Image (spheres, rainbow, N blue to C red):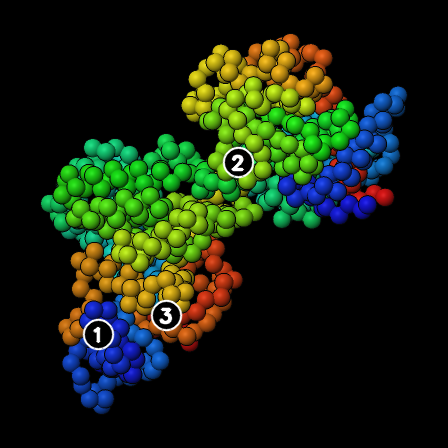
Amino acid sequence: MNKIIRGGRVLDPGNIDSIQDIYIKNGLISEAFPDSEANEIIDAKNLIITPGLIDMHVHLREPGHEYKETIETGCHSAAAGGFTAVCSMPNTNPVNDNPQTTRFIIKKASEAGFSRVYPVGAISNNLNGQKMCEYGDLKQAGAIAISDDGMPVENGMLMRRAFEYAKAFDLLVISHCEDLNLAANGSMNEGETSTKLGLVGIPNISESLVVSRDIGLCELADGKLHIAHVSTEESVNVIRDAKKRGIKVTCETAPHYFTLTDKSVGDYDTHAKMNPPLRSENDRLAIITGLKDGTIDIIATDHAPHSALEKDVEFDKAANGIIGLETSLSLGLKLVIDKQINLDDLIVKMSKSPASILGIDNSIKIGNNADLTLIDLSREFLVDSNEFKSKSKNSPFVGWKLKGQAVKTIVSGNVVFDRH
Amino acid sequence: MSFNKKHILDIGSLSHEEITHILDTADSMKEISERPVKKVPTLRGKTIILFFHEPSTRTKVSFDIAAKRLSADSISISSSGSSMVKGETLIDTAKNLQAMRPDIVVMRHSSSGASNILSKVLDTSVINAGDGMHAHPSQSLLDMMSIREVKGDLKGLKVAIIGDIAHSRVARSNMEGLKTMGAEVIISGPPTMIPIGIESYGVKVTYDVNEAVAGADVIIMLRIQKERQENFLFSTEREYSKTFGLNEDRLKLADPNVLIMHPGPMNRGVEISNEVADGPYSVILEQVTNGVALRMALFYLLAGVS
């Protein structure tokens, strides 16, 4: 199958920014060929074409929680959000702490035929913080990183050894930073709102303390650390300092942390409940500053599908998490519209940096996989839960009017999502 | 005035006028409990469900008696006897109750915001009888009724609330209500029990109980839950009692006509000494009597009987 993507603005930050055609042959970006050899010519006029977006933090829920999401629906949701690839977190049932599960995820994703999935294996067996998994086997089966996401690794010695041992297999360690004693089973950010609502609060220090610990351990072990879902000003400061000292640390934040604050909990809205929780306005602004100055490398969604069974309950009993794949790009573009970051920066944080952290070359250049996202910056839309491809609807952004959306997602030259 | 509230979920959403109207109505209800035949037909044919998803003696009995004195049919459900122990969700249980066409549902629940959820699912009126650490509006209203009864007006009174503010729904509702009514509120207790952001209530905070007690017109003591020691909120009952408890010596600092209140149940010898609890300034049992009248007033106003 030969394809030409015609007339779009090709934006591969640091590489290309011009109106040009892209030629695809056998799933790869190729030299130009005559129109007569094309099976399809895609009109990309008034669209921008970027290297495929990559979401490093997604919960696909399969195996085990298929009523919330399956690999197929999750990948469909990813494609609809413009993502050509996602990293799937290991807190499934069974946990992805073994090569069989890793292979199962890759096989299912490939059968689904939407976005690529790079499975993240567990740090500890069953995520229980007791024993190290077989990282070598996980890597061989296709795991791209390791993480106990959802659960912090409480034992500092295990975390140290995980950094050290993972080096043998060149595996990135993704850390969910949380001190469970300080978090105290809280259900929202600690502050004026939690006091008013009578909910147990989670202080900022429960995150930044462990961010500090893991940066220290990573430095000691000379490992490779990526910090998941940064939500506080203190964490941003600690990471900024670590980067200045040359430590190999990267980090992500999620769109909700730069868009919302704990005020969104409002009248006990469980769609504003996640872990880490929505923080104060001060933290939200610090996250934006971190995105601007490069302290925060990437935007990832922490896409966490839950059904009404987990969300239509008492606030303190509700599950943590919201879906994010289908609103992430538009919320990122809102930062661009609001002149907080520029478009190049956004594409770096949603595509180029995740790729480089994961060791993937997704540049738009001849010979590379044709993984591309076509974005209509002017498209305005209302976030409608009926349009979500995700099996779950737990989003606090339903009803929001947003501008800018992916209209075509191309993986290996195949259009896996086409918005009509 | 007409009373337009459909639910009583917290105190913060009630205006000065609405609180005054509730207290006035409660005052007029009080006399019914003094009669030889303590019953009026006002709410005959009305059904009130008391849904107590957390243990309670005094509040539940108080609501139940209030309903019966107004001739409403009241039905009590407790969590151990409800299908929620069989795994039914709060919303499903609520919808099933709704299907039986009650007029008012009174709920006590261990989760903050549970009554707010209920009010969104039910067509009937909801009264929050205490939800987690969030609110306990009927307690706060009966406290204000008890204060007003003796002091005439709440405006300008110095009210001290002492104890575990952070975990207390009574403290939250009283801070909101008393501030709305123009009282000066001073909060005291160990710093571990003072929640972050308390300034937003417009109250004064001191860790020195003597300062809080000095010149106080009203002192509301809160129950210390002994299991809180496990969460490192205080050292020992002995030290708590000595430093933050109310005893006769400390009471001498207060206004000579001070009122001592406690929402109960009391830990005698911990937050309040026997002498103070049973002493001449205590209106702790009067609070319980007023509780019935206040809850009768809430039923009456919500049932929309004119």
Say whether residue B152 is left or right of residue A156. Answer: right
Q: Secondary structure at mark 1?
A: strand
- Inspect this view and state whether residue A87 appears: no
Q: Secondary structure at mark 3?
A: strand
| Mark 3 residue crowding within 10 angstroms, few (<14) / some (14–19) / many (20+) | many
Say whether residue B146 is left or right of residue A140. Answer: right
State the quadrant of the N terminus of chain A.
bottom left
| Residue A368 rendering spot, x and y as whole percentages | 17, 70
The disc placed on residue A406 is 3
Outermost right residue: B36
Residue labelled with disc 1: A16
**Mark 3 and mark 2: span between their CA atoms?**
45 Å
State the quadrant of the C terminus of chain A.
bottom left
Disc 1: host chain:
A
Within the image, what quadrant is residue A135 found in? top left
- Inspect this view and state whether residue B154 appears: yes
Residue labelled with disc 2: B198
What's the residue at 78%, 39% (across, down)?
B21
